[in-house]
Amino acid sequence: MELTAYENQMLEGAHGPAPRFAMEVLVKLGQIYGADRMVEVASAQIMAHYGSLHDAGLELAEKFVALGGRFIIPTTEDPLSICERHWRDIGIAEEYAAKQERLRQAVLTLGAQPVWTCTPYFAGNLPRFGQNVSWAESSAVSFANSVLGARTNRTPAGLNYCAALTGRMPRMGLYRPENRRGQVLVRVEAGELSSLDYNTLGLIIGKSVGNRVPVVEGLPDSAGVDDLKYLGAAAASSGVVALYHAPGLTPEAMAGDPFGGEEPLERLRVGRDELTAMRREMNTASGEAELGVVGCPHYSVPEMQQLAGLLKGQRLKPGRELWVYTSPTVYELAQGMGCVADITSSGARIMDGNCLIISPLGKTPFRTIITDSAKAAYYLPSEHEVQMIYAETAELVSALVGE
Amino acid sequence: MEKIILKGRGILAGVAEGRALVSDEQIVWSHGVEPWKGVIDDSKVKLHGQSIKGRVFVYPYGKGSTSSSTWILETIRCGNAPAAIINRETELIITTGFLYGQLLYGAAIPVVDQLDQDPLAVIATGDLVRVDGAAGIVEVFKS
């Protein structure tokens, strides 16, 4: 592998023990996977949720602190496993919370920005088209590659610490333009799509294309940033889709032929019938919803406004809960707009900076959960003994409010 | 006892021997393998409930979340890791977990992929398997 003088200095320890350790890891992985050189990465998105990192990940983060490490590129953080505002009243164990706090302190000491979100692009981590970054969390990776046209692999948890400490990653995978070409053509013929339709479409695409790059044609011009966020998150849940192209909507598909002059390996059509069938498949519950969860990926400001409009003047039914997941950044804006008051006066809780999938939801008594997110509906039943109702946001609110 | 030798890409060095545990399905480490017991905890796969501890674990590919690397690292930290890993194709997420296992906990667990014959066809659960990760060589003793 060819290294620059600066990269060699880091490898030899001239910049301290933490960059040396990180460069050793990056060079070793680059050699295994045949990278010719490193790429410079402009930002990192790192995981610091104790529910995924466990004691081993905590020891890794604390090792970088002990080595005197400092992040040298802008580095944002995925959500935490607990919500500082509410963990005590939903039955999270003290020991779990204490471990999460140690991990939070470790990444802050290393120089992370305390955004605690899977939507760092709504909190100031916004790479430009064509820029290399090192992001983790599958929906954020999909958004960076697809919607922004930046370049990142699905960086493994723990490895993006090395990127943040050195500003480098081995040039492999999606950093190479030839690996970013479309492979499967997905033709959508379903007219205008609701927010839930984008979620459902993402599930179908992920199941069908696996780890190949889909080119999604036929999405309406009305597709918004949140719609594309959900499509990508769902396709990265049911499949391993780290990048999709949507001609007319995503930048790389507008910069040239997304198939790079090649024929698609496979063609697929998705119509209204397929969307309806998949939506039905995601509904596994027979009873009434006990708990509603929204914000997977984290709710944006417009989504907080929409939810506040639906909940204003309403009360949750006795014994029902609604947990709203968003970033501290969006929380603050929503608070300034009066949305937080409208949401919480219904009895709903806002779990800012927290992830509903990573949180110890299984420790709660709720067994029938309603959500407007395909990613949540896909993962929650495999991680907790719960049944799911998968519905539009307005249907979710109707199911939970009343006398 | 019939002996078969396979050659492939040595991902991570180490020499280990053990009984094979073979999955013809993708393995999701994140939320799919229980690190504190070393048991497959994914109800969607046929090997659900099987222990991976000390086995030569053979499966086609990894799948799922980018946090699989730290689930692997936690499994190693708890002393419940497999003796060796054999894949058709080892993803960066899997390699990262086992590389950190070497660097943090001194666990030299060999990882080999891209063998000259399909390991899922040649190796059966229960076969005695010896893996040399540096050389990328797998010796299979059929039982």
Image: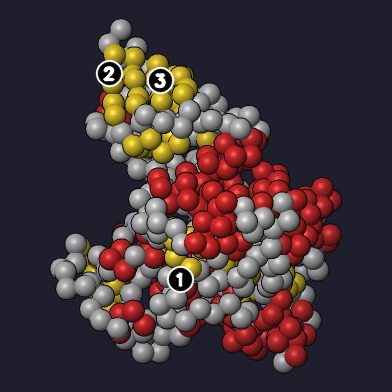
State the residue lying farthest toward the bottom. A337
The answer to whether A64 appears left or right of A284 in the picture is right
How far apart are the two marked residues, 3 and 2, measured between alpha carbons? 11 Å
Q: Residues within 10 Å of mark 2 (few under 14, many from 20)?
A: few
> Residue at the location (59% across, 87% down)?
A302
Residue A233 position, x and y percent, is 48, 67
Res B8 quadrant in image: top left
The amino acid at mark 3 is: Arg
The answer to whether A192 appears left or right of A169 in the picture is left
> Residue at the location (72% across, 51% down)?
A67
Q: Which residue does the numbered mark 2 point to in the structure image?
A: B4
Please say which color scheme the image uses.
Answer: secondary structure
In the image shown, does A315 or B28 lie closer to the viewer? B28
Q: Which mark is residue A132?
A: 1
Residue A336 position, x and y percent, is 75, 90
Q: Which residue does the numbered mark 3 point to in the structure image?
A: B130
Q: Secondary structure at mark 3?
A: strand
Residue B74 in view, yes or no: yes
Q: What chain does mark 3 sit on?
A: B
The amino acid at mark 1 is: Asn
Q: Residues within 10 Å of mark 1 (few under 14, many from 20)?
A: many
Q: Does the CB distance between marks 2 and 1 fall below 8 Å?
A: no
